[in-house]
Image: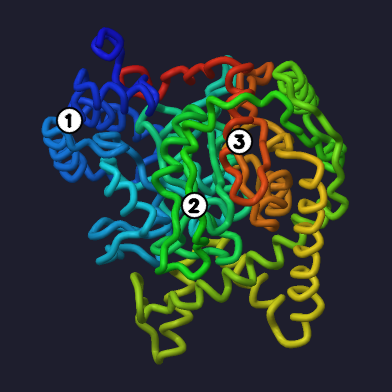
């Protein structure tokens, strides 16, 4: 196949690579080696991968080539992927980028990653993230910050890739892997996707198993994917979805062919535009891009309708009560006895205190303190119970709005990527998730698609919100944005050793 013989394999999309592998015009070993070489050349600058499983990757690639040779190729046979460090991978360090899990090598595999290996995918290694997925910039990682491959025009300032799935987004944007797993508790897939010019999908809560994912906030966490195109996301998402009896929150619903759904027309699709998303102080460029997105759908034959989500403004405050409360409970298990780090003390309590003080970073400690406070006697009713009632109202708002529309279109983030260490105020950092958090609170699917560049040359994304378990329609609508915006350019490769 001339295209794959003359093109750098790392420039292929997942779809192109899959097709080239299955037509035998490209071998998985060659494809995997190309990505390993790209990581070796550039990861020192970006810190996207925190561990590269070189020998494992080449062994899996050889097995895939053998399967393809025997005519036994599976859906993702030979496709190299990166895995967010939140997913437990058998005998490979799985730390959620926290010192408290340093050295932990689980003897089991998460359901999501097992599904990928059963589909023939190749594991390149583990990806950087905010510690325990708590962050919007990937600066809270115990393995150091991840750097966005994008830079503003004429600038050398290092920018954040977003978080918590910053390593996944940066690795995909930098051509270190064809796609990556990610997780989303309040926007941790969609926000970094928007800041790196990649596609990020957070499916409906319950669509993917959470078994084997390190828990942050169990009623909000959901696995998803980051890729370079909508079609790539559809292909990858199809393989990780499905009911898992090991996860009681996993839904027993059929998984459609998301890739096939992209060929359907959007003519007559009802696209909602929530008026409460028009916030004061939004970037003018973001507002203009949102308006352009509305026009793209109108031109494609969709019907645009204004909808209202009256309780949307309470979503972020309520989220920062519920999520820390669940985190304080989930993270209580890390005490120096069961997993990872142990710091000796004068007695048992002293050992607990020293272990947790040394093992957790500042942002995790902040959220544990917040969560413990709102769950404490006398404050449970005033904060946690009230936040849960607000969450119900937010869900009801979406239910009402979806009586009139099929999907909703909003910005993904208030603005583009910002500089490392630029935002020191935690509240200012939390506001990055203001457009994504309501979707998690309602358990809905969300998708971020790169839609344009700022005047300074940084990516911006548009977000689509779908009905529960209707990822197919949401992805179909996402294809409209991708088609209208055109193939998104790759960031200039400044990070490779020969060009640093």
> What is the crowding at mark 2: few (fewer than 14 residues within 10 Å), some, or many (at least 20)?
few
Q: Mark 1 touching mark 3, by CB under 8 A? A: no
The label on residue 254 is: 2
**SS at mark 2?**
loop
Dot 3 lies on which element? strand
Mark 1 and mark 3: Cα distance apart in space = 31 Å
Q: Residue at x 49, y 47 (%)?
A: 224
Colour mapping: rainbow
Residue under numbered circle 1: 29
Residue 158 appears in the rendering: no
State whether residue 428 is above or below residue 358. Answer: above
Residue at image position (47%, 32%) is 259
Marks 3 and 2, the one that precedes in the sequence: 2
Q: In which quadrant will I find the C terminus? A: top left
**Alpha carbon of mark 1 to alpha carbon of mark 2: how far?**
34 Å
Q: On residue 448, which mark appears? A: 3
Q: Position of residue 248 (x, y in %)?
A: 49, 70
Is label 3 in contact with label 2 (beta carbons under 8 Å)?
no
Indicate the position of residue 359 as horizontal and vertical percent values.
Answer: 44, 68
Q: Give the label, 1 or 2, closer to the camera.
A: 2
């Amino acid at each position: 196949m001339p295209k794959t013989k003359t093109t750098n394999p790392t420039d292929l999309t997942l779809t192109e690579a899959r097709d080239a592998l299955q037509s035998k015009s490209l071998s998985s070993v060659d494809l995997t080696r190309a990505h390993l070489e790209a990581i070796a050349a550039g990861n020192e600058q970006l810190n996207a991968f925190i561990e590269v499983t070189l020998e494992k990757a080449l062994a899996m690639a050889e097995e895939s080539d053998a399967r393809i040779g025997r005519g036994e190729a599976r859906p993702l046979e030979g496709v190299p992927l990166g895995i967010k460090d939140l997913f437990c991978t058998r005998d490979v360090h799985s730390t959620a980028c926290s010192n408290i899990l340093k050295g932990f090598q689980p003897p089991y595999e998460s359901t999501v990653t097992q599904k990928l290996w059963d589909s023939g995918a190749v594991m390149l290694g583990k990806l950087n993230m905010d510690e325990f997925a708590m962050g919007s910039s990937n600066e809270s990682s115990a393995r150091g910050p991840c750097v966005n491959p994008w830079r503003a025009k004429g600038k050398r300032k290092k920018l954040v890739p977003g978080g918590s799935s910053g390593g996944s987004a940066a690795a995909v944007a930098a051509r270190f892997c064809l796609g990556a797993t990610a997780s989303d508790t309040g926007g941790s897939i969609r926000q970094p996707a928007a800041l790196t010019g990649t596609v990020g999908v957070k499916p409906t809560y319950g669509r993917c198993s959470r078994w084997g994912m390190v828990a942050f906030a169990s009623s909000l966490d959901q696995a998803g994917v980051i890729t370079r195109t909508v079609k790539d996301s559809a292909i990858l998402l199809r393989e990780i979805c499905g009911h898992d009896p090991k996860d009681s929150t996993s839904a027993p619903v059929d998984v459609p062919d998301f890739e096939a759904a992209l060929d359907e027309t959007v003519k007559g699709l009802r696209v909602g535009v929530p008026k409460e998303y028009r916030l004061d102080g939004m970037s003018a460029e973001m507002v203009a891009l949102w308006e352009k997105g509305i026009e793209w759908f109108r031109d494609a034959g969709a019907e645009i309708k204004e909808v209202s989500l009256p309780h949307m403004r309470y979503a972020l405050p309520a989220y920062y009560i519920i999520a820390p409360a669940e985190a304080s409970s989930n993270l209580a298990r890390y005490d120096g006895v069961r997993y990872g780090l142990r710091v000796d003390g004068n007695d048992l309590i002293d050992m607990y205190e020293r272990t947790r003080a040394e093992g957790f970073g500042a942002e995790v400690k902040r959220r544990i303190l917040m969560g413990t406070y709102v769950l404490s006697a006398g404050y449970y009713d005033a904060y946690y119970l009230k936040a849960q009632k607000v969450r119900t109202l937010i869900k009801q708002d979406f239910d009402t709005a979806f009586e009139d529309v099929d999907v909703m279109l909003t910005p993904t983030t208030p603005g583009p990527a910002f500089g490392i260490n630029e935002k020191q105020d935690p509240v200012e950092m939390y506001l990055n998730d203001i457009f994504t958090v309501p979707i998690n609170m309602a358990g809905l699917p969300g998708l971020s698609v790169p839609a344009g560049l700022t005047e300074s040359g940084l990516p911006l994304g548009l977000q689509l919100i779908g009905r529960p378990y209707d990822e197919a329609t949401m992805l179909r609508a996402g294809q409209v944005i991708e088609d209208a915006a055109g193939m998104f350019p790759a960031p200039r490769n400044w990070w490779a050793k020969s060009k640093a």
